[in-house]
Image (tube, grey):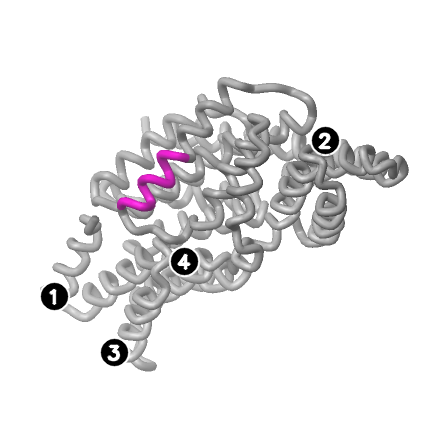
Amino acid sequence: MQSRLLEQLEASIRSSPNRTEWARSMCRQASHYARQGIVDQATQAIDSVRQSFGVTLEPEVASWLMLAEGILHFSNGDFQHARDRVQRAHGLAVSMNATRAAPACAAWFAHIEFNLSNFTRMVQLLEQALTEARADDHQARARASLVMADGLHFSGTFQQARPWYDATRLHATQEGDEATLSAMFHNVAAFRAANIRLAHALNEQLPEEARRATLEASSASAYDAAIGTRSFNSLIPLVSGQLLVVEGRLEDATNCLSQIAVDQLPQRLRALLFADLGWCASSLGRVDSAKDLCQSAVIALEQDIDDDDAAYAMARLSKMYELFGDAETSADLAFRAKEAFSRHRQTQQSVLSLLENLGESITRSAK
């Protein structure tokens, strides 16, 4: 299915009245391809702009170009390089008063800071994006609204996130940005699944939430297939597999999770995959395989990992090591899981407070 946004950008590239507008459309095209996981075409568009301008990059063009490069890094899971490029793009846009580029740079910078758990800076950037973006700046407003929604959903309150998801959908639909809609569908399923799986690992059952998350994950996968998005090829099976674990469909979960190429999964998520596969193996009586997977999960936990993911993985591992007869390791993992869960709850409350205050500030300024 051809993207309406790409059609508009291609028309602009052919008929742009000046080089700056041409470069902006090329960079937005690169960003769109990057978000769909079509790396070659994203790279070609970026290279075309660099070759056209050489060392004579205008500030606005440089901002759009570095933003596109940052989005490409982000889509490849390289958050640190993404942050460097987008921070540079944002700083240049603000300092040189590139008013068309600054809100989009701020919105994407906020998204990256959210993924790196830099929540105070995230809120500052969101405020800039949401207060400075023009009403028809659908790119900036869709991305900023998505970050607001994700932050509130992460904090455990889908009801407060929902209006921001609706705003994301509205702005993305306005310009035919299917890549943003794809990200939104995936994020809704992923955050709901994260809450469900953690509750299940801590002995709480949420069957209705699990049913909704399963439907959302299936819808996200179908939408990606329709529009040609490849960027969530590993993440959707991870979410689907975790939900199958919660449902107790362990053979199906094993088949789903086994399809994921570990080296294509971000390092921070690998402990989850090993823990889930280990849980399935141990529950199905495949003890030797379960022990190997548990060891891999413990090693993967040495990487940077979000507290909710750490709490989940360690809670699962604790129960498995208890089954293996290793009471000491089981107790240690249970203690660490409890600590990680406590930190996660504190973070949720902190982020919720920050975003509620931001929402109130934006509402007041709009009156």
Range covered by the magenta-colored residues: 218-226
**Disc 3 versus disc 4: distance between alpha carbons?**
21 Å
Q: Is residue 242 left or right of residue 202?
A: left
Vertical relation: 326 (above or below) 37: above
**Disc 2 versus disc 3: distance between alpha carbons?**
53 Å
Residue farthest toward the front in the current orientation of the protein: 285
Circle 4 residues within 10 Å: few <14, some 14–19, many ≥20:
many
Which residue in the protein does label 1 denote? 14
Tell which circle, 2 or 3, labels the residue nearer the N-terminal end. 3
* 144 or 100, nearer to the observer: 144
Q: What residue type is labelled 3?
A: Ser
Q: Is mark 2 on a helix, strand or loop?
A: helix
Tell which circle, 4 or 1, labels the residue nearer the N-terminal end. 1
Vertical relation: 171 (above or below) 102: above
Which residue in the protein does label 3 denote? 52
Tell which circle, 2 or 4, labels the residue nearer the N-terminal end. 4
Q: Residue at x 37, y 26 (%)?
A: 163
Q: What label sits on residue 71 in the rendered view?
A: 4
Q: Which corner quadrant of the image does residue 216 belong to?
A: top left
Asked whether the residues under the numbered discs 4 and 1 touch, taking CB atoms below 8 Å apart as contact, a structural biologist would say no
**Disc 4 versus disc 1: distance between alpha carbons?**
24 Å
Asked whether the residues under the numbered discs 2 and 3 touch, taking CB atoms below 8 Å apart as contact, a structural biologist would say no
Q: Which amino acid does label 4 sit on?
A: Ile
Which residue in the protein does label 2 denote? 342
